[in-house]
Amino acid sequence: MYPKIYLYKRIKDAKILIDRHFSDPIKLNDISESVYLSKYHFLRLFKEAYGTTPHQYLKRKRIEKAKELLGRGLPVNEVCIQVGFESIPSFSNLFKRETSFTPSEFRRHNGK
């Protein structure tokens, strides 16, 4: 068995990987393999450490970055691509679910 600190260092490394590559297509298997853990063990440890699943964390990270970019006045389609979504409808639906605003509404109220 590994000491707990060693396992949590791996989980922190996975979080850093998500933070750096949030706009890339990231799969659970890829992240768990990068830190040498089975995906189920990784999922359990990540949720224990951060209170959320890696997928939920990734979505939240993308939405936070989208809010930043929309606040700068960037077009919705450009923001969609920059934060890693493949389609504007999926981006818009998730953005509205998370913020209660469509991306266009958010940009109008918060953009420069």
Image (tube, grey):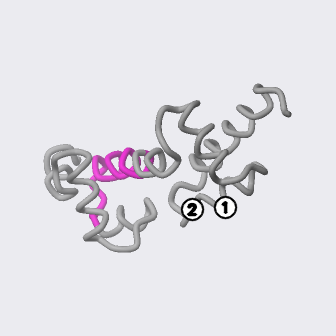
Residue 41 is tagged as none
Q: What residue does disc 1 label?
A: 30
Dividing the image into 4 quarters, which one contains the N terminus? Answer: top right
Quarter residue 104 falls in: bottom left
Q: Position of residue 79 (x, y in %)?
A: 35, 61
Q: Amino acid at mark 1?
A: Asp
Q: Which residue is mark 2?
A: 26
Question: In this picture, which residue range is highlighted in magenta?
Answer: 61-76
**Vertical placement of 34 versus 27: above or below?**
above
Q: Residue at x 27, y 64 (%)?
A: 76
- Contact between marks 1 and 2 (CB within 8 A): the answer is yes
**Number of marks drawn:** 2
Between marks 1 and 2, how big is the CA–CA gap?
7 Å
User: In the image, is residue 77 above or below residue 97?
Assistant: below
Q: Residue 73's image quarter?
A: bottom left
- Between residue 35 and residue 110, name the one nearer to us: 35
| Residue drawn at (41%, 51%) of the image | 59
Q: Callout 1: helix, strand or loop?
A: helix
Image coordinates for residue 14, horizontal then vertical, percent: 66, 45
